[in-house]
Image (cartoon, rainbow, N blue to C red):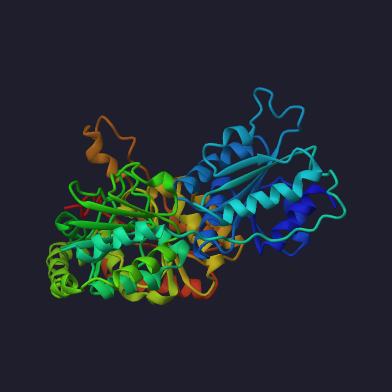
Amino acid sequence: MNVVDAIAHTMKAEGVDILFAYPVNPLIEAAAKLDIRTVIVRQERIGLHMADAYSRLSSGDKIGVFCMQHGPGAENAFGGIAQAYSESVPLLVIPAGYPRRLAHYYPNFNSTMNMQHITKWAEPITMGKAVPEIMRRAFFQLRNGRPGPVMIEVPLDVMNEDVPDDWEYIPSFSAKTGPAPSDVDAAAKVLAQAKNPVIYAGQGVHYAKAWGELKALAEAWNIPVTTSIEGKSAFPENHPLSLGSGGRANPRPVKQYLKEADVILGIGVSFALTAFGVSMPKGKTIIHATLDPMDLNKDVPAQHGLIGDAKLTLQALSTAMESFSKEPATARAHVPERITQIRTEWMSEWLPKLTNNDAPINPYRVVAELDRIVDKDKVVITHDAGSPRDQTTPFWQATSPLSYIGWGKTTQLGYGLGLAMGAKLAEPDKLCINVWGDAAIGFTGMDFETAVRENIPILSILFNNFSMAIEIPIMQVSTEKYRSTDISGNYAEMAKAFGGYGERITDPNDIVAALKRGIEATQNGQPALLEFITDKEITISNE
């Protein structure tokens, strides 16, 4: 057995059933021979984004894998790997590499050297007999510790080398760690005795599948819950204790309750400071529960640290809190009613935008109608960078786990399309949606053809205002002198040309009917792109 066949057999043993790829890499054929589906994309970044969502939607149980050619293929993949690293997503990247005699020679691109700072683990296969141990290391890195991309580079002259005949691959497993009992006891006392605690839940809750434990703790102690963008849908947002999800834009209850909190429990979060997340207010007692010790006191000072898996941490914390009086929790009996009151007042202020019936269409109106008509238990939605993110996150009510793919530490335009396609392959029975703008489609729009060719019926919601609208107030330059933010295109016609369903909507009275037609197209197996001609909306909810 040669090296690429051995890698394919390893993938098969690890439960990999899809290989996302851009030619040319011999691993594609090796995988196909083992009935691993190959999905070929039009650019490397999209393939990585698809693998990204595939891993996320399975909470890391199934690993998304992407392979590409050496040199320019690996160079083009850099951004997609960096995005997954930023968002802590486990995916396996297998680039071809230059022959060993040239691998370290200028100007050849060496993936191992150049990608070691955007991967959790990066290693080359330098000889055939090393494949078993390298693949073992790779998958154990993918299934253990903080999630992140792992890269295995395969030099061209190694691909056909033999692997030892007696090789037998044993699949990896996941080993969990929990916080120290003394740390749990100290944190439990602080949280149980807090007057106005808030739980801030992140993506670690998804990976640990700790949704039930999070809900149980919140309900038992009457603690309001908010989530990071990555953690959105970890707690049902129709729950009386939900504050909503906080990012650059957020519902008013989020900032109100964080401002008033005396204790904040961050569970499954890094507390990384970013322009696209909620900043923790100063002067609070912080309990930081994270899988990665590197997060602790990195950006936000914490008084208590709980290192370990989110599910084990929440279980231990709940048990430890049972010995304390629930008098503080009883005193918070009014919290659900107050959350409702604050949200109602906030929503009433936004109602003119959410119900706007003028043309050009207001994007908030589209988000509101979409939120109202879809089956929340059978949907996965994601957004793109910039305005679509800020317009969707506060007003989309996520009610079931992993129904929202949130992101925002790094904000690459065009990310959402690949995420939606990867989500559809992971959850074929669900309506998978990406919301993007006309700037984002300029980066990855050609891969809508991939959705058509690979039979991936997603619903793509495009806000087209013929402008990079969010840039206008930043530039502060007369449009007569500075017009490079003005862009144009008819993307509904593009979708049709690729063989998908395309429709351009200009009348607000057609929004609901158009959404239903787009959804119906996906149910009939056809990718749909609905192009809404929108105004240059720049207001976001961040007060």
Q: Where is residue 290 shown, x and y percent of the image?
A: 40, 54
What residue appears at the point 80 percent right and 58 percent down from the top-left corner? Answer: 168
Residue 492's x, y, as percent? 44, 58
For the residue pair 85 and 307, the one nearer the viewer reads as: 307
x then y, percent, for residue 385: 37, 49
Count of picture labels? 0
Name the residue located 63 percent from the left edge and 54 percent from the top edge.
139
Q: In the rendered image, is residue 510 in sight?
A: no
Residue reaching furthest to the top: 106
Q: Residue at x 58, y 33 (%)?
A: 114
Q: Quadrant of residue 273?
A: top left
Residue 40 vs residue 333, the one in the foreground? 333
Name the one closer to the observer, 248 or 132: 132
Find residue 95 and report its horizontal and vertical position in percent.
66, 43
Q: Is residue 172 left or right of residue 433?
A: right
Left or right of 282 on screen, residue 404: right
Tell me if residue 249 can be seen.
yes
Q: Is residue 310 left or right of residue 190?
A: right
